[in-house]
Amino acid sequence: MSALTREKAALRLADEHPAPEPSKHLRAGWYALLAVLLIAGGAAIFHRTVNGLATTNLTSITPWGAWIAFYIYFVGLSAGAFLLSSLIYVFGMTRFERLGRMALLTALVAMIVALSFVLLDLGRMERALSALVYFNWLSPLAWEMRFYLIYILLLAAELWFAMRVDLVRRADRSRLARWLSFGSKSLDTARDHRMLRILGTIGVPIAIFGVHGGTGTIFAIVKARGMWFSALTPIVFIVSALVSGTALLALLYILRQKALKRPVDGGMVADLGRLLGAFLLVDLGLLFYEYLVPLLSMAPHDTGVMHLMMEGPYAWTFWILQLGIGMVAPAIILMTRLRESVPLTAVAALMVVVGIVGVRFNIVVPPLITPALEGLPAGQYFPSAVEWWSSAGIIAMGLLLFSLAADLLPVDEDVHVIGGTAHD
Amino acid sequence: MTAAAQDPGSRKEPYWVMVIDLQKCIGCDTCTVSCKAENRTPPGISYNVVMQMEIGEFPHTRRTYVPRPCMQCDRPPCVGVCPVGATYKGESGVVIIDDDRCIGCRYCIAACPYGARSFDFGENYDEMIAFTEVQAPEYGVEQGPRRKGEAPIGTVRKCTFCLHRINRGEEPACVETCIGDARYFGDLNDPDSAVAKLAASPRAFRLKEEMGTQPRVIYLK
Ligand code: SF4
Ligand code: SF4
């Protein structure tokens, strides 16, 4: 105890209360909202399942749309959140350790959401498992399916080791905790930390190269399409994963502390903000080269796509959503003294999380609007109501999973444990 | 029996190619229509289209009609990306889609540099009598009636070089019906064939050759 600072002691006291309670109304309202979205989304998904992809606005010219954009969006959030957790468990950056379990939970839920989007997008959903039965070693998509699976298992295992000791502690008052502790009894966390470090170390290359770099590779190898076919694509995916994952965690942390009426650790938020700002800068730099090279080389394939993106009917998604809201405005907040304000950091994080949606749509859609062959008609695409509502439903499912887990599992009780024993 | 016939190693499989003479194509779309009739493709799916393209270098450009079937590439990007191996280069040299295996991910549509692939959204020509009663044999395989929700609905489709007709010793429907006689079909391995001679012409070129896809459709400019 003497080793703990007063702040940590206070937190420890706070943590020893049984599950902290948010206001009843807030919680009821939140779950009601999710229920509404789930019902509307469920109806849309049902319609889509019965009537097939004709319910979408996809065509043979633009075969991928909103669902694929959301799929790479959530893979990015997942990989980013996981990489942040590895800062703690692998690289020993203990000042973020309060976020560790939440980062892992976020990564796990985001990945489940991402795979749900892939499933929904398949023309023949009932053959989804074929993607694991048959293999084509030339296809990045075939590799990705396997990497996603390994990654999900790894995330679940890591989350378990991170929570194990608190599950054991709760075992006598909670049946769920007893069941989830899988008979484990030990209160010693040294082995957990070792396992977390091992799993995290395996996970880092899997997340970088397997999961998100690999997802970028799906697009990067398509030589038929402008702006995809570039060795920069996988790297852009990785960096933007770091951006979006860090932003989401900062946002979730602040919102959760507020909802549970707990103190926000301003210092840690500022550190997160600084990290996010740095990632954003790298992302902006990559964007600069991503556009400069095709522009100056006048590669017609790429410039056609860029024209469409910057001057086409949805140019606002590029200028306002992707660049303004997603990058420049948050960068201004995070690069200046403004980042010392917690609410402003939350706003910046929210802007990034929203803006990256624009990034994802602009990765997927414009290259599929420009015709593959000069002389073929150009595509036209805006998601249909079914696509929007089903997406809302799947995202609501993810939020529900996250909220239930956060309500029922020891998602943030480990401060006093790791803080006490430290990393070796 | 000749030595070549006894030794299967040296006996050459026919190397099917299509030659399209752009000077003779008048843009009448007969190939597109006869293809739809032959293959009974649903609305929104045309294995063959006739595009308008700009040929030649500025300022000596001219508008030309360019019919576009599937190129049956020898190095097909669509095959490389398929996660389940549902699309592959068949023994005949035709790139095949196995609609019993295709999961409908549409990665191949995104990857085809020629826009030659279509997704079957399940639409039908309901005004056409018996449209759903019988389907054309795809890649030489009988398909039976077209039933709601069953493959090939929900999978990807494309030109088969009329493999069912080749197997019967006939030419693809578009070649047979071409009004301007602009299309030729044959075995490039046979030096006496019309296609072999035309392919050697200085007018011969292939679309997006620089991509290294090695298309089996040769155009004469
Ligand atoms: S033209 Fe397209 S679909 Fe046909 S073989 Fe080539 S890449 Fe595949
Ligand atoms: S749509 Fe079918 S054929 Fe095309 S890549 Fe996917 S599984 Fe393969």
Image (cartoon, rainbow, N blue to C red):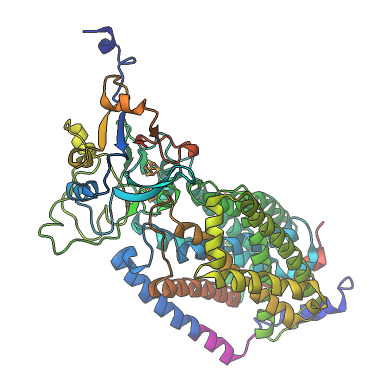
Ligand 1 quadrant assignment: top left
Q: In this view, does B133 lie above or below A354?
A: above
- Residue A273 drawn at (x, y percent): 76, 71
Front residue of this view, candidates A104 and B148: B148
Q: Residue placed at 40% from the left, 51% from the top?
A: B109
Q: In this view, does B11 lie above or below A333?
A: above
Q: Is residue A154 above or below residue A386?
A: above
The answer to whether residue A153 of the structure is visible from this angle is no
In the image, B41: left or right of A347?
A: left
- Residue B112 drawn at (x, y percent): 42, 47
In the image, A204: left or right of A72?
A: right
Front residue of this view, candidates A108 and B53: B53
Choose top left, top right, bottom left or bottom right for residue A195.
Answer: bottom right
In the image, A241: left or right of A389?
A: right
Image quarter where the N terminus of chain B lies is top left
Choose top left, top right, bottom left or bottom right for residue B91.
Answer: top left
Q: Which residue lies furthest to the bottom in this view?
A: A25
Callout count: 0
In the image, residue A218 lies in the stretch drawn in magenta: no
- Residue B50 drawn at (x, y percent): 30, 49
The answer to whether residue B21 of the structure is visible from this angle is yes
Image quarter where the C terminus of chain B lies is top left
Front residue of this view, candidates A120 and A162: A120
Q: Residue furthest right?
A: A2
Per the picture, the main secondary structure of the magenta-coloured stretch is helix
Q: Is residue A319 above or below residue B44?
A: below
- Give the residues drawn in magenta, as a range: A21-32
Front residue of this view, candidates A226 and B50: B50
Q: Residue placed at 26% from the left, 23% from the top?
A: B193
- Residue A382 drawn at (x, y percent): 43, 70
